[in-house]
Amino acid sequence: MGKIIFVKAPATLKDIYGDLAAAGNEQAPIGLAQLAAITRQNNHDTEILDCGALNLGYSQALKIILDKKPDYVGLSSTTAFVDHAGKLAKMIKQKNNKITILVGGPHITALPEKTMDKYPQFDIGVLGEADITITELLESLDNKKDLSSVKGLMYRQGKKLVKTEPRGFVEDLDTLPMPAYDLLPDITKYYMPPANSLYRLPSISIITSRGCPMQCTFCANVVFGNRCRAHSAEYVMKTIRYLYDNYGIREIQIYEDNFAAYRERLIKLCKMLIKEKLDLSFWCMASVNMVNPEVLKLMKQAGFWQIAYGCESGSQMMLDKYKKNVKLERIDQALKWTKEAGISTKGFFMIGGPNETNETMKQTVDFIKRLPLDDFHVTFFAPLPGSEIYANVKKYGTFDEDWEKMNMFDKPSFIPHGLKEEDMVYYYKKAYRQFYLRPRTIWYFIKKLRNPTVAKKIIISGFAFLKFLFKKER
């Protein structure tokens, strides 16, 4: 059996968050840990190298990889960071061309031909869900078999690119092994959510489902799709107990599109958590259309301290353009229910989408201010490859297709007709200023300082945030 190293390529917090780097966070690469568990289960010598968590530069990462003498290096990347993966792959190939470079994730799934053409150092693209594909692929490579029968690939055959039949979704997620948390750097030391989404430490993220039933035009859900599949409540509980007992984890961040979409499972899991009486707190994301007062009260009893909702805009016109299938009144109602249940509220918003105007951006800022939110986050709209809007976004405005600029945090890559970049930056910063510099928000975070395990992170993030807010634009 060949040796494989799954690598999260070097990318600094500055690369990801721009001027808000000091307030950024390092999330565990659960997808790589899931694949590592599968390859290890199939008797492959398996390791993970998380360059971001370990703060490794390219030269350091290259030396570690070469010293381990792998047969295969597996890279996964989003659009904004595919250049980082490409740079590391090129360096590996220059030193040892016999190492086979595999790349997967949402970007290559959305743009396989363009990605393989741009990065000749990538040998094989793994498209879609890789859980079954990785096993069949490595077995074929180990035994020098023809790859044409392996579904879900794009690979090189001489100067030609060959794309195999698409891979279907994993139907029963419970058949997958638990992610190989033990192969990651010490998860209690190297991974931390952003300060404003952190209740206590040590904290780690998990993923309990795949797919989202929503049809939002900006979502690039090309890997998991819109067919919803979820781990059972028993599987999730087993994962939680493992992290609790073996690592002393005291906060679980559930990072998936819509945790509340599986109501029956959610109720069952909450009842299991209440019965277990674990000393744990939980954070999750949900759709405002998927919650009600009864479920929220149960979540509070189970230890959920904050729910983040994808609110997106304060303009009904923009919500309709995004195909959010939600009314502004429902957003307000769901947040009020959440607050009444004793759960903190967070809202995700974005500005600068197709048809956006100064008036709709103002509506979003005003909406954010009047909602019962404890916290919020706003980014620039980015037409990601694989999203519905990506194919025809240029008819709505100016689009810089430089993949590295599609990180949503630093500067807009898309500017709608009728707007200027400075208009978007103005409302972007105005939203942050008017939300965070008001007394009730300041008091909310002052109260969080009482918790010594998160106080340092909040203070550092706060200073970084103030520097960002009052930085003069060139």
Image (tube, rainbow, N blue to C red):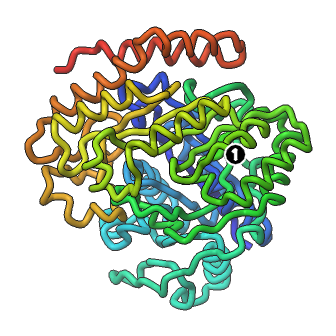
Mark 1 lies on a secondary structure that is helix
From the image, tell me which residue sits under label 1: 294
Q: Toward which corner of the image does residue 431 lie, by quadrant? A: top left
- Residue positioned 38% across, 39% down in the render: 349
- Asked whether 88 or 467 is in front, the reply is 467
- Say which of 426 and 223 sits in front: 426
Q: Quadrant of the C terminus?
A: top left
Given the current orientation, which residue lies at the most extreme left position? Answer: 418
**Looking at the picture, how far across and down is residue 85, in whole percent?**
45, 53
Q: Position of residue 323 (x, y in %)?
A: 34, 59
Residue 37 against residue 21 in the figure, above or below: below
Q: Is residue 473 above or below residue 300?
A: above
Number of other residues with Cα within 10 Å of mark 1, as a class: few under 14, some 14 to 19, many 20 or more: few
Q: Is residue 229 found left or right of 87 in the rendered image?
A: right
Q: Going by the image, does 304 lie left or right of 211?
A: right
Which amino acid type is marked by label 1? Glu
Picture coordinates of residue 351, whole percent (x, y): 28, 39
Asked whether the viewer can see residue 67, the reply is no
Quadrant of res 204: top right
Please tell me which residue is depicted at 20% across the width and 20% down the height of the picture. 473
Quarter where residue 63 is shown: top right
- Vertical side of 311 occupied by 107: above or below: below
Horizontal and vertical percent position of residue 217 = 34, 60
387 displayed left or right of 340 = left
Q: Say if residue 181 shows up in the picture.
A: yes
Q: What residue is at 59 percent from the left and 70 percent from the top?
A: 130
Quadrant for the N terminus in the image: bottom right
Please tell me which residue is depicted at 22% across the width and 38% down the height of the picture.
360
Viewer-closest of 173 and 43 = 173
Tally of marks: 1
